[in-house]
Amino acid sequence: MSGKLNFSTETKARIAECTIHLGSVYKFDDSWERFTIETVFLHKDNDRSSLLNDIALVKLRKKVRFSHYIQPICLPRASTSTVLNNLCISSGFGYTLKNVGSNRMLKIRMSILQCNERWDVICIGAYENLIVQGISNICKGDSGGPFSCKSVTEDRWTLYGIHSYVAGFEKTQLGINMRAND
């Protein structure tokens, strides 16, 4: 990640109206804690015309206090390779039926495929910063959500990917995640 973005006054006003909601598993719930976004940091190699590096970090105006419902997640070191065969979970409010999103956050156990296992489907070129998931799937509406795996040696979760794209509604389609340590 790098670089603060320079926004126009109009864009800054729109960002100031954006909030992050934490602390609830329901989309429409008054118990959310709301945090106003102060700054957005796009990935230095973000390219709107492709699927590569379509992630950003946000700086919030006030500090988040951790609670039973709001917990931090570990980030992998840059040198960490993706782990196969760990317990991995994806979550989000994506579609459960065509064009119908869920009002409750859903989670699903996921597996990581080595890129060469599905080379014909998605691994075209040098996309080493993507993680390919298979079998069970995320759906449209889950973009930006976490793909996390539990450590086999410690009682902690690590964010390995951020949902970037899913090819369609079908469970057999592959979900694509931006690798979190890039």
Image (cartoon, grey):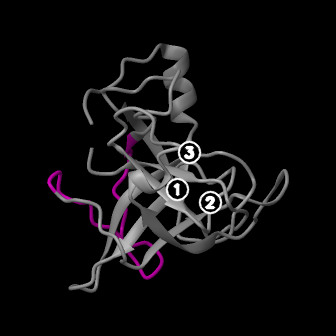
| Tag 1 residue | 145
Q: Is residue 138 left or right of residue 104?
A: left
Residue extending farthest to the top is 8
Q: Name the residue located 61 percent from the left edge and 68 percent from the top edge.
A: 136
Q: Give the main secondary structure of the magenta stretch.
A: loop
For residue 138, the mark is 2
Hey, what amino acid is under mark 3? Val
**Residue at image x 53%, y 70%?**
23
**Residue 67 in magenta stretch:** yes
User: What range of the chain is rendered magenta?
Assistant: 57-79
- Which kind of residue does numbered mark 1 sit on? Gly
Question: Residue 163 at x, y = what percent?
Answer: 51, 51
Three-letter amino acid code of the residue under disc 2:
Ile
Q: Position of residue 62 (x, y in %)?
A: 37, 51
* Viewer-closest of 5 and 142: 142
Crowding at mark 2 (Cα within 10 Å: few <14, some 14-19, many 20+) = many
Q: Which residue is mark 3?
A: 121
Residue density around tag 3, few if under 14, some if 14–19, many if 20 or more, within 10 Å: few
Mark nearer the N terminus (2 vs 1): 2
Label 2–label 1 contact, CB within 8 A: yes
